Image: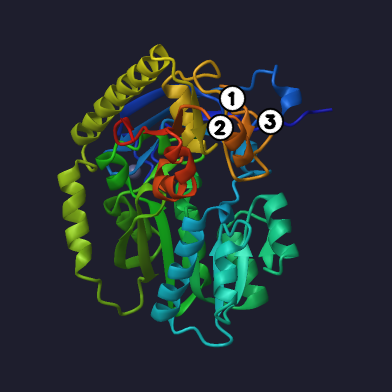
Amino acid sequence: MITPLAAPACRVVDACLVCGSRDLAPLLDLGEHALANNLVTPDAADTAEPRYPLGIQLCQSCLLVQLTHIVDPALMFSSYLYVPSTSTTWLAHCEELADDVCARAELGPDSLLVEIGSNDGTLLRAFQRRGVRVLGVEPATNIAAEANAAGVPTLNRFFDEATAEAIRQEHGPARVIVATNVLAHVPAPVRVLCGVRLLLQPGGVFVNESPSLCDLVEHTEFDTIYHEHVSYFSLHALRLLCALAGLRIVDAVPQAIHGGSLRLVAVRADQPWTPAPQIGALLAREQAAGVVSSAGLRAFAERTARLRERLQAAVRELQAAGQRLAAYGATAKGNTLLAYCGLSRDDIAYIVDRNPLKQGRLTPGTRIPIVSPDHLAADPPDVLLLLAWNLADEIRNQLAWFHERGGHFLVPVPEPRLC
Ligand SMILES: [Zn+2]
């Protein structure tokens, strides 16, 4: 009997994920990391999980910044604990996005709106409240089931051309396709966008939000690099990617969410649209920030190394002064930061997170216990390291009592500061 070969758990990216070029310049090596979202149950605490190299490189041909090594998506996405509806900032963002899309797309009562990577259906519910016919596509089995149970029709599969064709056959073409924080996760973004092109009706719009490479570089957000984020998009790279799939970008609007994102509006390249004038200004900002050259991106890598030294020094100083630290936000980026900066359970007593699915588990690699906000009130530390620094305002408002009783927040990015 022949046993089929298992897919490799991790592969080296030696050809660009978008254009296939082998002209790849290494930029930043963050070391070997456990998968940032694979939180550990207490019974598995003594079992070491695999670690994979984590680094980024620049394709000098199409300017896509991408990981140096890709981990098999099945290891990361089959049972996924990230449910964003626990953040009030995200809920407000969904309402604004739904209003913006409805204003742009002239959705009629029969128009179909498809969301790629629809998670637990939070964004689609905002469209349902506006009377829009929706369909979600979500690869995580447990979360797709949750969305269906909550009344948001959701297909449990990855989105590609085959999925697009199946939706088109069963539900008709889409007036609008929305994707937030999806493209960065997929090893073959061109296939996703070819699916978008296939499913979109003439005159339809594709609205995509991805974390902005420009913000990542300008604010030294190195911790947003982890294995689930395969690509880090500039508008320069997105333009070429869309063109390869037969789409054209007609508008781009920076967003504050997730430490800085870019909302793109694209249409089928065969449709008559005039691109918005601010696209030129955004391209110029990227040039100035150094995100389209290996020299500019290596300067970012040097800032990242300096940030690690400063954060380690800040933690050592606090400890020498007898201060006890805990952290807030058991986020994937938090795990990159803890591992890269060498912070362990000896440094961080626990991590508070509002998501009940995460509470009771331990962080991958570093084994720091994740607890509910009640624990913070019962056993407050002196200093709270904000791993979810993108929600710093929201968290500091929620935890005004902690500050009032003398506690401090340590914000790590763009450089460590105590407040
Ligand atoms: Zn390329």
Foreground residue among 418 and 362: 418
Is residue 120 visible in the rendered image? The answer is yes
Between the C-alphas of marks 3 and 1, the distance is 32 Å
Q: Amino acid at mark 1?
A: Ile
Residue 322 as seen in the image, left or right of residue 129? left
Q: Is residue 275 above or below residue 412?
A: below
Q: From the top left corner, tell me how far across and down residue 207 is, in percent.
A: 42, 66
Q: Is residue 3 left or right of residue 165?
A: right
Q: Which residue, given by chain and number where applicable, does mark 3 sit on?
A: 6
Q: Are marks 3 and 2 in contact (CB under 8 Å)?
A: no
Q: Amino acid at mark 3?
A: Ala
The residue that mark 1 highlights is 368
Residue at far top of view: 320
Q: Secondary structure at mark 3?
A: loop
The local crowd at label 2, few if under 14, some if 14 to 19, many if 20 or more residues have their Cα within 10 Å, is many
The amino acid sitting under disc 2 is: Ile
Please state the horizontal and vertical placement of residue 208, each as a whole percent of the image: 42, 61
**Residue that carries the numbered disc 2 in the rendered image:** 351
**Residue at horizontal 62%, vertical 61%?**
137
Q: Are marks 2 and 1 in contact (CB under 8 Å)?
A: yes
- Give the alpha-carbon distance from disc 3 to disc 2, as whole Å: 36 Å
Q: Which of label 3 and label 2 is nearer to you? A: 2
Point out residue 126 in the picture as x, y percentages from the top left corner.
Answer: 55, 71
